[in-house]
Amino acid sequence: MLTTVIPQGYAPLLNLYDTQKAIGLLKRLFEDDLGGSLNLRRVSAPLFVEASTGLNDDLNGVERPVSFDVPDAGREAQVVHSLAKWKRMALHRYQFSVGEGLYTDMNAIRRDEELDNLHSVYVDQWDWEKVIAPRDRNVDYLKSVVNTIVNALANTQATLRSVYPQLTPLPLIDRAVSFVTAQELEDQWPGLSPKEREDAWVKDHPTTFLMGIGGALRSGTPHDGRAPDYDDWTLNGDILLWNPLLGRAFEISSMGIRVSPESLDRQLSVSGHDERRELSFHRALLAGELPLTIGGGIGQSRVSMYLLGKAHIGEVQASIWDPRTLEACREAGVILL
């Protein structure tokens, strides 16, 4: 089924090459602002990890990683889905202190992704992680970090608009973040699907942080899937912006305060994944050997789409698309990279 929707009358605000230049500029601007505001240092990250370590993110638990053998090493490797766990191990290895963190370019392949305007099998993110103190494992600290990220996005947008006045018709990012829980949305709209609830809320609250994702709501089902071994389901969420071009809530970032040994123990049991306790990452975390952290991923292509007013993620990244999507974009004059 064709899920790509090209808005009627859509025309890109920047030509093909100006789009490439603007993407390069916005990435430099945002990285500098984010790194400076959160005290993050840039590090190099892997494209693949050993399957036996448990470092790969299994997302919703059904996505298949791209795997291959490394004959000389005698190991099986997996292309990463994300770096959620690797980053925490990296902070331990770098011996970063409380208040210090890292960020990196994360490139991943998610072979089972359903393709549409926002989703591709190629994923590019700014993955970041920061060491925190036990006293920081609370909602107020989580909210303060969300506000910092939103301000970095808004600052980047302001500079881009000064360099590319063609972008001035786009709405400004609202720096006033609305904080709401997934349970509150279910209580307000029990008859809607989770995505419909997001659209209904974010349309009236154009910058939203939706909290409490992964654990079962009172209905018995979670708002959305979240692996049990990186976010604390009571201290996480998604940054959502209202995208008037597509007429929907637009996820920019998934993030959260990471599991403590206690919350990991609980979430592994609740999710039925006790077998992971034997993996090296999980053993170290349960033993209290890893630092307490907060972290997340911020979609580079998603940010580029939003700040440049693009209708399809293929306008800001090179990937593979199904024939019907290619035809629909060709007919609408949308150039996919």
Image (cartoon, helix red, strand yellow):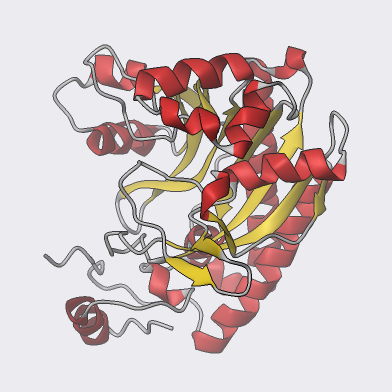
| Residue at the spot 35% in from the left edge and 78% down from the top edge | 320
In this rendering, does residue 229 appear at all?
A: no
In this rendering, does residue 127 appear at all?
A: yes
| Residue at the spot 65% in from the left edge and 62% down from the top edge | 46
Give the total of numbered labels.
Answer: 0
Residue 241 or 174: which is nearer the viewer? 241
The x and y percentages for residue 186 are 27, 20
The x and y percentages for residue 289 are 75, 27
The x and y percentages for residue 91 are 78, 41
Relative horizontal placement of residue 132, taking residue 184 as reference (left or right): right
In the picture shown, does residue 69 fall above or below 41? below
Q: Quadrant of residue 328?
A: bottom left
| Residue at the spot 74% in from the left edge and 65% down from the top edge | 28
The x and y percentages for residue 59 are 41, 44
Split into 4 quadrants, where in the image is the N terminus?
bottom left
Split into 4 quadrants, where in the image is the C terminus?
bottom left
Residue 52 or 189: which is nearer the viewer? 52
| Residue at the spot 48% in from the left edge and 33% down from the top edge | 276
In the picture shown, does residue 39 fall above or below 65? above
Residue 333 or 315: which is nearer the viewer? 315
Residue 290 or 6: which is nearer the viewer? 290
